[in-house]
Amino acid sequence: MERDVRPYLAARGTRGPTLSPDGRLGFLADVTGTMQAWTMDDAAEWPTQRTFYDERVSFVSWSPAGDRLAFGKDAGADEHDQLFLVDPDEGSIERLTDRPDAIHTWGGWSPDGERIAFAANRRDSGHFDVHVVDVQNGNSRLVRQSEGLRSVVGWSPDGDGLLVTQAHASADQDLYVVDVATGDREHVTPHEGNVRYLHPAFGPEGEAIYCASDANADTLELVRIGLETRAAETVVSGDGWSIDDVALDAGTGRLAYARNVDGYSELYAGRLAGPTEAAIVEVEIPDGVASELTIGPNGERLAATVSSTNLNYSIFALAFDELGAIGDSPDGTAGPEATRWTHPSAGGVPLERYHEPELIRYETFDDREIPAFFTLPDDYVPGETPVIVDVHGGPHSQRRPSWRNRPIRQYFLDRGYALFEPNVRGSSGYGSEYAALDDVEGRMDSVRDVAAGVDWLRDHPAIDADRIVCYGRSYGGFMVLACITGYPDLWAAAIDFVGIANWVTFLENTGEWRRSHREAEYGSLADDREFLESISPIHDVGRIECPLFVQHGENDPRVPVGEARQIAEAVADRGIPVETCIFPDEGHHTTKLENRIEQFERIAAFLDEHV
């Protein structure tokens, strides 16, 4: 039985593909232990590393001119990204922004490759303004002052307009077109209630915007929004499932999208056959999850990140010329197989060792069925198997059969633990109604869903009902604390990563740019303070019975480190075993390899002692 965590965490991944006009690939890879920028000329060549930092690189984007790549980097995982350019021929790096007190979110290259657009909260930490920088001289210009959390997501085909999104909440966005010269804006998505407009892009001639939206259905569809009519027309329905990623090249009308079917991706590619028609075929990829779809500047090639529970994050690509005859329906005809370009190391554990989870459904308190992934270790002993209940963050997120955190999950499986990964109400992937079930007053119903999952586990013949662990990060960390205070008799131990202990102090101290966005889903300090106090685990610490492990980063801009300190101190004051692991050089995510090794070695020892 494998006991050392290092071979598992030695597994590497490649993500965030970007294509040059001549078909070269740029991407992020954590070969050095943190994500850096790499490039490769074709699928048969060895990639070349382009950045060499101790800190992580957050994205890389190839210029439409093909001469440079833009990338972003923060410091100490504080998410205050600065923007840079790297010349792949000379290796020289140029800094475009130098405001470490501000966040710079990538917007995109102009079609001619001469300008870059981005959003930044330089003027006010709670508001992101739209900027454009000339890459030849480095001169930056404020295009428009904005309010709230705004992002630039693309340029119009003629380079005169910017597509800007405003996030009101996880389930509610708006799209605007901003004139680059004047700063004037047009609101193109007037709507009532919560509507999502995700992965938007200008269509041919810039006359419309295409995106994934639930404007016309409970699930996300591919829609067209005419700039004149401002009405969302369905182009492709997901047939009861969500289309959760879209890429479109305005010049050629070439198109790709991924459909999320019970967490598994189906990838389609083709072209627009009319304003509201698409001719597509399904592209063959490994069973798992496809994300980060991108089409090159000339519309000739599609690239995507693909992973599964036994495939570490890899870049797959396909030339549109390979599609051949294309059908006229979303079902299409048999399509080609995408080519794998990157082959990151699996580390010290062969991919064949990784377990495929079983997708199950269990009944909860209101007779709903909750989907979950369940995995048993090899050679388990009936009635004696401990289990980790791993609750995802978000809450608008979804546990899917991807590589995400899979090495550490396999580590626990090889140590004899079963894994239970529920998609409780509030999760994405199952429609807008399901995702909204835990909003504000419904918050604790999702905790009841976890408890119902434990009932299912207790009835399973493999599981030891006295050795059940609650485990989660970020919002999942709150769920851990809510579970061990709300249902203290269920748990043998708990692992809380960057979790929320007190909703009031969390909202008071989180980054100003996030507060209104989070309040829209969780409840506001002004209107819901009493309710937020009532569901804050810190006020029910007296009910905790199990040992608790708390992990956090000092530089976390999302969930301030004070959340970890206050819950750990309160639990310790009661005499309950508690262990803290707080890294001074990390933020909301543990980004450095040595820190990841340390935290999981300590968690394994903690579980050995208490479970």
Image (spheres, helix red, strand yellow):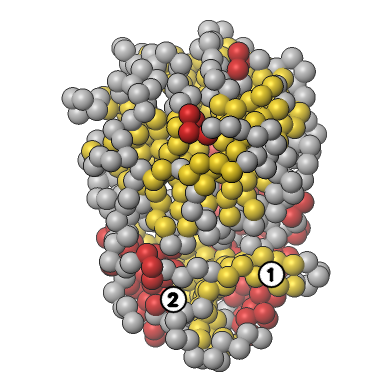
- Against 571, is 177 above or below? above
The residue singled out by tag 1 in the image is 361
Checking the image for residue 413, the label placed there is: 2
**Is 546 placed left or right of 11 in the picture?**
right
| Pointer 2 or 1: first along the chain | 1
Judge by depth and name the residue closer to the eye, 399 or 274.
274
Q: Residue at x 49, y 91 (%)?
A: 381
Amino acid under disc 1: Arg
Q: Position of residue 133 (x, y in %)?
A: 40, 17
Residue 395 appears in which quarter of the rendering?
bottom right
Q: Disc 2, disc 1: CB below 8 Å?
A: no
Q: Which element is circle 1 on?
A: strand
Instruction: Using the rendered image of the protein, determine whether residue 305 is visible from the camera's viewpoint.
Output: yes
Image-quadrant location for residue 166: top right
Residue at the spot 72% in from the left edge and 26% down from the top edge: 276
User: 466 or 562, which lies in front?
Assistant: 466
Q: How many marks?
A: 2
Name the quarter where the N terminus is drawn.
bottom left
Callout 2 crowding tier (Cα within 10 Å): few <14, some 14–19, many ≥20: many
